[in-house]
Image: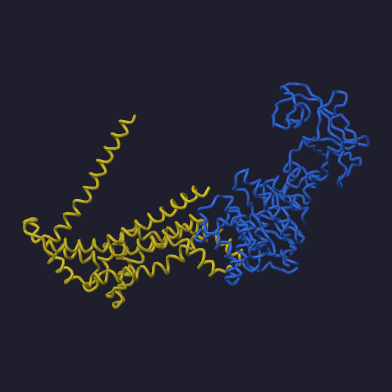
Chain colours: A blue, B yellow
Amino acid sequence: MNSNTSVQVINCGKTFEDGTQALQPINLEIKGGETLVLLGPSGCGKTTLLRIIAGLETLDAGGQVLFNGEDVSHLPVEKRNIGMVFQSYALFPNMTVRDNIGYGLKVRRQSLADRQTRIQEMLAMMHIENLAERQISQLSGGQRQRVALARAIAVRPKVLLLDEPLTALDALLRERLRVEIDTLLRSLGITAIYVTHDQSEAMALADRIVVMSNGRIAQQGTPREIYQQPSNSFVADFIGTANKINGRMTDQGFEVEGVVLPKSILNVVGGNSTSANPIQTQAIFRPEDTEIVSQDQAHFNGQVASTFFMGDRTRLLVDGISESPIIVETTFKQEISIGTEISIRIKDQGLMLLPDELIEDLPKEIVEKTEQ
Amino acid sequence: MMLSRKLSFYLQLLFTLLVCAFLIVPVVLSALAGVTANFFVGLESGLTLSWLAQVIDLYTDTIYLSLLIAFACLVITLIIGVPAAYALARMGGRSARIIEETIVLPVAVPGLAIALALILSYGGFREFRSSWLFILVGHVLYTLPFMIRSVLAVLSSIDFKTLEEGAASLGAGFWYRLKTVVLPNVRPGILAGSLMVVTLSIGEFNLTWMLHTPITKTLPVGLADSYASMRLEVASAYTLIFFIMIVPLLIAMQMLSASNKAKTTKHSVTKNIGS
């Protein structure tokens, strides 16, 4: 079965004709059957990387893309046997739904009977049997994306590539289709690479997330690792909400402006060092890892600057702790008025140290030097 | 509010009708003149088809030549224009725009100037100069931008690059993509461009007048000839024949764009029923 193709990206960089470097040379391995999500803000190179894997973009000299160990770098897209789903659907407006789904099969010169069987299978899988004879212009966005998925999967591709497939849809539909795609990918066991800028989409779908920034990999890991042990402040900021505080590690704990936070609140699950470190470091904590406590138990005291009632919880912005307001979440039912003095405690293992400072924060020359 | 809206509606209607009348009355008069026995006497002199017969008798060759040139012009603009539009759309950016503007130049430059340039460059080739192919070259120069523009407009409205990428991802090579995805989707542009080219070629006068020889005359040149040297009735009958040839083309062009619109409307209606 070809559904377990592994993909290896070796030293793949991309410099556009005008000299902009969209992608620094990247190494990446995607195991057979794995769902990998490339996540990052626009312009981070995630789509470029996907298009390189697809064969829609040439890569800089020295790079290689392997499918199951076989070099496909020089094969054009039509020879790579991939399935691709585009943000803009890319369905053929001159064909019906049925002909769209059957297009790849026809290209492969399958017999009419085989094609019809496979098309019927795909229509059933995507629950769009009733749309088979429709024109593309008669379909809604969600229906179009289902057809696009069916079309891509119909040819039994080695790898399924999805380029922001849900971005053009409204929130409710996005949620529903996301669940469907998830189920689909699990049941097919197909190797899938999914590009998105939406972190919740990434968390929900991925076996593994690769967070990208400025044409390089900022961090890769399971959704849990990425969220709970971000390896730099970019990842911490991009995934979820993070409060940043500056301090330094001492034998007693993490010292922030004279206050020593005990070691018990440090997150030591990851490889992050907790040993005494005399230099300034940054630490982050999530809004949900805080609690409002009485003053004697507090780590920090501050003033409520604004409140946002979100139904199940209330989000508070608290001044007077660090330069920018600290974000705190509480399930406290009563309304908290602005200006109230509150005491905050970081829950055990809620504080994460960021050992390596993010490459983006350094001047470009230094980055290039460290590269060599 | 209601009243003033009604009033303005009728005023607009009146204005539109006046403009229409202004444009249509000369046409009707001219057409009538072509079938009137003696225009100076008026309609009382009776209606006749003899003028038309006379025109057909005198100018059959001209009519055929016009059709031949228009058809040849269409074939050439299709062969050059459609791939050119595709290449320009693929290329994109500044250089594509510069090339497009260069191609459009013959539309902006007076036909007489193009004709003069052609005569200066190629007039020395006697055989070529005296054949209808010489006129054809002028017509191709003049109509090619319309074909390219028309195809290019459709290409840029359908995001054909992504469509092609979609087809390629499904295994389709270049020629297969072209046949199954690109061409079917730019067909409206090709059709509109074709009608435009034929209509323009049949009606072209400026260029043709400079390029023609006594034995290579097209319809409009013949028309000028008949105005200058024949009775007014003959010239009018000529105009009538010209109309008969050109009006169906114009109507076809209109119907084409109308049917395109109707298609989209029909689709949105069924969509509403469906949901």
Q: Is residue A136 left or right of residue A167?
A: left
Quadrant where the N terminus of chain B is found in the figure: top left
Q: Position of residue A46 (x, y in %)?
A: 68, 53
Q: Quadrant of residue B73?
A: bottom left
Q: Give the tally of numbered discs.
A: 0
- Outermost residue, bottom direction? B127
Residue at the (42%, 68%) spot, across then down: B80
Q: Is residue B116 left or right of residue A306?
A: left
Q: Position of residue B120 (x, y in %)?
A: 31, 69
Between B241 and A189, the residue placed more toward the observer is: A189
Q: Position of residue B54 (x, y in %)?
A: 14, 69
Q: Is residue B173 left or right of residue A367?
A: left
Between B99 and A303, the residue placed more toward the observer is: A303
Residue at the (80%, 37%) spot, across then down: A285
Q: Is residue B49 left or right of residue A218?
A: left
Please tell me whether residue A329 is drawn above or below residue B157 in the rendered image: above
Q: Position of residue B128 (x, y in %)?
A: 31, 76
Between A174 and A13, the residue placed more toward the observer is: A174
Please tell me whether residue A91 is drawn above or below residue B80 in the rendered image: above
Q: Quadrant of residue A247?
A: top right
Please tell me whether residue B137 is drawn above or below residue A197 in the rendered image: below
Residue at the (83%, 33%) spot, across then down: A346
Between B139 and B169, the residue placed more toward the observer is: B169
Please tell me whether residue A299 is drawn above or below residue B214 in the rendered image: above
